[in-house]
Amino acid sequence: MPVQTHCPGSRTLHFDDSGALRTLDQTQLPFSRREIVLRSADDCERAIATMQVRGAPLIGAVGAWGLAFALADDDSDARLESSLHRLLAARPTAVNLRWALERVRRRVAALPRGQRAPAARDEAAAICDEDADCNRRIGEHGARLLGALASGRPLQILTHCNAGSIATLEHGTALAPLYRLHRSGVPLHVWVDETRPRNQGASLTAWELAAQAVPHTVIVDNAGGLLMRQRRVDAVIVGCDRVAANGDVANKIGTYLKALAAHDNGLPFWVACPVSTIDPQAPDGDAIPIEERDGREVSHVAGRLPDGTIGAVQVVPDGSPVANPGFDVTPARLVSGLITEHGVFEASAEGVAEALAAATAGPAARTAVR
Ligand code: MRU
């Protein structure tokens, strides 16, 4: 298999000389930079399901590569459909997975056998390239918005979960504007929600921000309300796993509570996402499937043990029932706007329709801010 160069090493996904896809195992961060090697649809499905790769855009890209690997083995219609459905079932909430898989299917379905596998690879590579470019543009639009809030003191931004570069191909969504502001010299400090139960804020966002020397402080998930009330937060920005047609947004569990606190304190609550995160088939947030995850993520906390190994300690009494919904829905009325690659749109049926139209029309940027 030839060396694939569409996703260079600076990105979250890259190819080695054997044609295998390589990426960091995110379950090991920030303590170990262990790479995983993905050579098949099964590898990609497993990496998504176990959250070795996670974050809506990255899940979509790895799913697309999984389908391309499947078609390289067998490019029949039956294999296309069975692999697509297996990959789709790996995680239910982030619509980017469905979007990417359907995009690869649209590209190859009408092609004769023999031409499907290379076309699928081209499409997966295009999804990666476009994601990096979308996030760069989200960074530009978001930096304009957040930069306008700068006053005499460092800008104080709160974020939840990880919507950074490792949740995407490059740059991140919610973190892209923050990286851009930091690079351009705007004084900035980020409050990082730890994001129980899996702590993607504490382990991944803090790791990324530290690597870019962005000042930040990790807080427990319950601290945000107090900080907002004390006027120690200027704005909240988060990523997103699915936007419904009416502008409701699904993101990591706990996001809704931050939106409520921001609303009560008169603070902007921005959602950064590519247009591929919009699901026009979901009329509102109630139609978004919410992933129910293993209760062990609640009963146990994972981290580095005193002997240096990564393990989990139990924090819930034996036998106590636990529940673990992975995402929640923030109603559109609490969202100040959707920061997309095409500009900033109102979180409403009209705004969502405009964002979709802008994506169809091409790259012309729009700014329709509430
Ligand atoms: O369960 P995860 O870690 O995949 O959840 C990730 C999030 O909720 C992110 O905010 C979202 O996917 C946007 S990533 C750019």
Image (tube, rainbow, N blue to C red):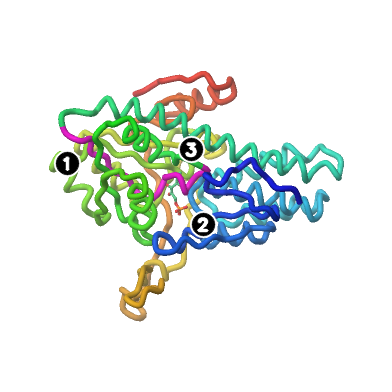
Name which residue lies at 47% across and 32% down. 136
Q: Look at the image and say whether residue 166 sits in the magenta stretch.
A: yes
* Residue 27 covered by magenta stretch: no
Q: Secondary structure at mark 1?
A: loop
Tell which tag, 1 or 2, sits nearer the viewer. Answer: 2
Q: Position of residue 122 (x, y in %)?
A: 71, 39
Q: Residue at x 55, y 54 (%)?
A: 23
Instruction: Give the residue pinned by disc 3.
Output: 244
Nearest the eye: 267 or 176: 176
Which label was assigned to residue 24? 2
Q: Is residue 306 above or below residue 237?
A: below
Counting residues from the start of the chain, the first of labels 1 and 2 encountered is 2
- The residue sitting at the front extreme is 17
The mark total stands at: 3
Residue labelled with disc 1: 232
Q: Which residues are magenta?
A: 153-169
- The residue sitting at 45% across, 44% down in the picture is 165
